[in-house]
Amino acid sequence: MAFTAADVKNLREMTGVGMMDCKKALVATDGDMDKAVEWLREKGMAASVKKAGRVAAEGMAYAAVIDGVGVVVEVNAETDFVGKNEKFVDFVKGVAATAAKEAPADLDALMNCKYNGTDLTVTQQQQEMVLVIGENIKVRRFARFAEGVSVPYVHAGGKIGVLVNLETSLSAEQVTDLGKNIAMQIAALNPRFWDKAQVTQEVLDEEKKVMLAQMENDPKMANKPAQVREKIVMGKLNKFYAENCLLQQDSVRADVFEGTVEAYIAHAAKELGGEIKFKDAIRFEKGEGIEKKQENFADEIASLVKG
């Protein structure tokens, strides 16, 4: 029986075992999924197979700077309770330390790295955590910045992790407050773009289309000349930038600086006597995009009784 890359991916999701070992299992069992699971269990690699199929949408997003390398990770668990477990939190921090140290190219590479301070791979350490804690646990994603100065921020105990990367002539200590305030802005408002220069013509055209349609449907605006409506649209686009682009947004820390984020950065650079440029940022929100299964326990019990 032949198997595909999708089969390897599915087996990995079922068992939490690395891609290469899943491929070996499917080769050894001629592509039979059930036998491949059993093969992995017999090899001691999939002791947590039953838990690995359960939805893990809680957990923790975490950001840190480790030996000058900025890293942000998301590790999921099934319940919010486990997300606060000390052993789980230590595991998340260990994943971040591994990503910072080993510079893996992607998630698969990270899972095959030696987990920080052990002889186990990250995959094996993850399986150990599943057995110890009793829930499905899954390293979902990571990102890292090796260049420039990175500033981390973790919101609400791990609900959101943000990593801001700056290009600066100043020390990390000098720009920490600025970087943290920018990260808080990103956590709070989740801007679509960092700068208005990143907004594509396609996005602008769509916004203009919506705005013009709204005016057509507004009795007060519909009779205005086309050139007047065009000017109004241009004014509304400035508002679009202010709402959707980080550097053009008003600072949420008005107690620190009143004005846009780009003006705040320029002000901080002048005050500190150096150059500061916002380069990039990563925002991970715990469980975003994961469809949480809604359990109906009454229906579930009824189906068991009928069975």
Image (cartoon, rainbow, N blue to C red):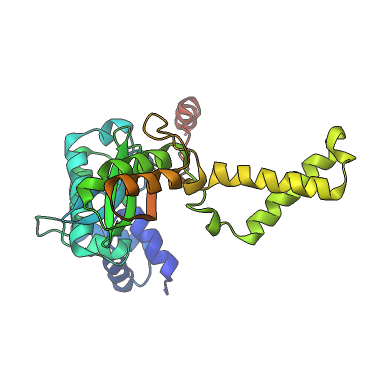
Q: Report the number of discs.
A: 0
In front: 291, or 49? 291
Q: From the image, which quarter does the N terminus lie in? A: bottom left
**Placement of 25 over or under 279, stated as above or below:** below
Residue occupying the point 28% across, 52% down: 150
Residue located farthest toward the right when viewing the structure as drawn: 223
In front: 52, or 206? 206
Residue occupying the point 42% across, 31% down: 254
**Placement of 252 over or under 90, stated as above or below:** above
Relative side of 130 to 265, left or right: left
Residue 302 can be seen in this image: yes
**Placement of 185 over or under 103, stated as above or below:** above
**Placement of 84 over or under 10, stated as above or below:** above
Relative side of 196 to 297, left or right: right
In front: 52, or 67? 67
Relative side of 44 to 189, left or right: left
Residue 47 can be seen in this image: no
Residue occupying the point 46% across, 31% down: 300
The x and y percentages for residue 181 are 35, 39
In which quarter of the view is residue 252 placed? top left
The x and y percentages for residue 212 are 78, 46
Residue located farthest toward the top when viewing the structure as drawn: 298
The x and y percentages for residue 209 are 75, 51
In which quarter of the view is residue 146 placed? bottom left
The x and y percentages for residue 123 are 23, 57
